[in-house]
Image: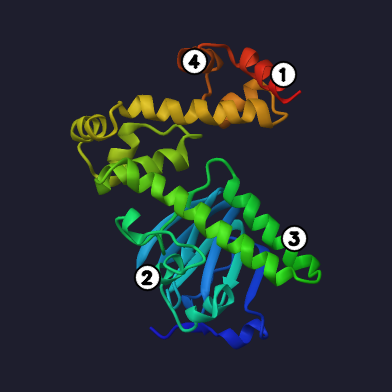
Amino acid sequence: MEQDIVRKDMMHNNPIIIIKFHHKKTEEFTMHKHEFFEFVYIEKGEAAHTVNGRHYTLKRGDFFVLDVDSSHKYYGDFSLINCLVSPEFIDKTLKDKKKFIDLINNYLIKFSYEQLSESPANKMFYDRDKSILALFNRMYEEYKAKKPGYQEIMRSILVELIIHMLRNVYSYYSKTKSLIIRNCIQEIDRNFDTRFTLKSFCEAHHYNSSYICRKFAKEMGMSFSDYLQTVRVNEAQRLLVNSEKKISEIAQSCGYNDMKQFLTVFQKYTGMTPSAYQKQGVRAEQ
């Protein structure tokens, strides 16, 4: 099948472009590829995403980077931040490079590829603490304002973004060498705010739940349930201190529809109630 190619000259001689847009469900991108790297962050909604023949479901908070010449298309109702970057924008020595690995081996970034078991390009990851979103937004504001020296600032933010992405990615790869459990961790991190269970994960991927349960505990040093609750409680702690949401709203945002269960789990893992933790956090900031 012939594909559309988004060429560098369509960037109007800009080595970097960053845009925000909303994609309606009634619209569908044709399969296409780019002559530049593409950094993407999903701000709202959900989308079906096909990359080089592999299918993913994207949701709010997901981010990824695509190698040059990667084929992909979207379908769904979602909003995203899209950053298109010519490799030479980061450094002139990267001209004509097509792999994300070439970027991370550059002297400006100096992130050892040996720290990763495989390239993170063309794979989806979740921004749990919103640090990746903050960097995308900083780049977007610089690009929109176009003040003197904006490209230099965008370059430094982009390098910071790449390193933060690699830290985020490395956290998955460093926890376990097993692809199955790594996928499981990613699913938890992306779906902890839903009624996500070991059973739903195993059914979706056709795994034996008893096998995954044992393997998860062996590789992670804790049960599937403990890891899931830890992720949920960590997010609740962040929201209690950094948001204006009510405790009941935070409970729902973290996957707890039963307030009593949330209070019990939170106290078990932190040793205090959500309200006490919130007050402690407020006092620490004063």
Question: Marks 3 and 2: in contact by CB < 8 Å?
Answer: no
CA gap, disc 4 and disc 2: 42 Å
Q: Nearer the viewer, residue 112 or 274?
A: 112
Callout 1: helix, strand or loop? Answer: helix
Q: Mark 2 points at which residue?
A: 52
The mark that comes first in sequence, 1 or 2, is 2
Rendered image: mark on residue 283: 1
Q: Mark 4 points at which residue?
A: 261
Q: Nearer the viewer, mark 1 or mark 3?
A: 1
Q: Name the residue under label 3.
A: 141
Residue 51 seen anywhere in this rendered image of the structure: yes
Q: Where is residue 56 in the image (x, y as percent from the top left)?
A: 41, 57
The image shows residue 115, relative to residue 3, as above or below, that is above
The mark that comes first in sequence, 3 or 4, is 3
Amino acid carrying mark 1 in the image? Arg
The image shows residue 152, relative to residue 188, as above or below, that is below
